[in-house]
Amino acid sequence: MSFKDLRYFTEMMRSLGYPRQISMENFRQPNFPLVAEILMWLVKRYEPNASLPHDIDSEDDRVIFIKYVAQFMATKTRIKLNPKKLYMADGYSVQEMLKVVTMLYNAVKSNKSDLANEDVTERSFDISNKISELKQARQLATDITMSGAKLYELLAMEVDLRELRLAAVARPLEMSHIEQGMKNKVVTVENEIKGTQHKLDNIANDEANLEAKIEKKKAELERNNKRLKSLQNVRPAFMDEFEKLEGDLKKLYEVYMEKFRNLTYLEQIVDAYDRQQQVKVEETEKQLRRMQDQLREEEKKLLNQTDTFENFAEDSDGEEVKEAKNRNPRVVGAMEASDSESEEGSDYISSGSELAGEGEEGEMPLSDEEDDDDTDSENYDEKEDSDDIDF
């Protein structure tokens, strides 16, 4: 029991109007008189006309009291109490009594709130989940009606039965009737004793029958065990063929596992080879791209060199023509000249015409370095073609 439950119990009992002051220390030790008084007050608070046994001196009386209270709460309030905890009369009993006190406190609290509100509104009840309770209520109403009718009939017979009852009570007792009744009772008891003795005698016979059945079952069990052992020792006719097929199956399974392992290994090798080839293809593509880029750069360099050579050739042709003109100045006066001078002039003219012709055609003699570059480029092109063919 917790301190919180005990505090709630005392506060609720005080609010319900319990005349006695309840302390938290009352339930540290078993206190059955206090628990009985509280239970009696709770029952009277719920049902003022309820009749309870007031004698709680002996253990049997206490048990009857607790049993009656638990039965009353179960039938009237549908609250299930634990009689053992109530009989302990300590903190555990407070937990059980708190169930009833909480129900009464909530009822009083709701009643007070309804009286405080002036505007009373109709509440909507959902009885769809209470069909079973409705059926029980109808059955109880029928039973109450039948019980009331039966009670009415019995009360109507009370007028005649009262006279007979009073006459029987007022009639003096006769010893002969008492003696006859006692003899009848003795005979009845003797018959019961004989029946019991007969049953005790039959117990020995029943025991012998049971032992015979047990022995029979044991013999049957031994026969079945022997039969089982004989069946286990007998070798079936198809056992040789079965063992042979089992050995063949084992060999086939070993072959299958070996082939499966080899197949798995070869698949791994093929996957590794494919990955290597893929890497090689990627590397060759990268090399080809690098070589193409290098060729483009070399072509650009060659084009730049040819342009510079052409410009240089044009400049050299112009300078030679000027030198030729300077070496053959125009003569004013006599038109005669020596043979040597005329030959030199013709030589210069012829050389100048040759240089001019070469300049017009745009063909210049290449140096040794340029010849080597051309041969290297041709060899590189042939190598590239061969690589493409191999690829």
Image (cartoon, helix red, strand yellow):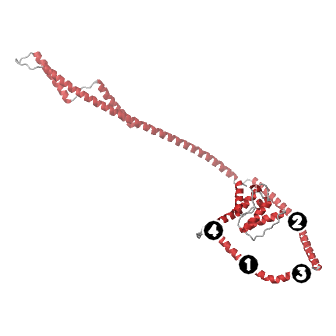
Left or right of 78? Residue 208 is right
Is disc 3 placed on a helix, strand or loop? helix
Give how far apart the Cα atoms at labels 3 and 2 are.
Answer: 50 Å
The quadrant of the picture occupied by the N terminus is bottom right
Residue 49 image point, x, y percent: 75, 71
Name the residue type under label 3: Ala
Q: Residue at x 67, y 52 (%)?
A: 242
Give percent across and percent down for residue 252.
61, 47
Mark 2 and mark 4 in contact? Answer it, CB < 8 Å: no
* Residue 344 vertical position relative to residue 382 in the rendered view, above or below: above
Label 3 crowd bin: few (<14), some (14–19), many (20+), radius 10 Å: few
Q: CA distance from mark 2 to mark 4?
A: 73 Å
Instruction: Kindly identify which numbered label has been placed on residue 170.
Output: 3
Q: Amino acid at mark 1?
A: Gly
Residue 346 locus on image (x, y percent) = 13, 20
Asked if residue 382 is positioned above or below residue 192 in the image, the reply reads above
Disc marking residue 148:
1
Q: Is residue 28 left or right of residue 274?
A: right
Q: The residue under label 4 is which amino acid type?
A: Leu
Which badge, 3 or 2, is on the more N-terminal residue? Answer: 3
Determine which residue is flagged by label 2.
203
Q: Residue at x 17, y 27 (%)?
A: 357
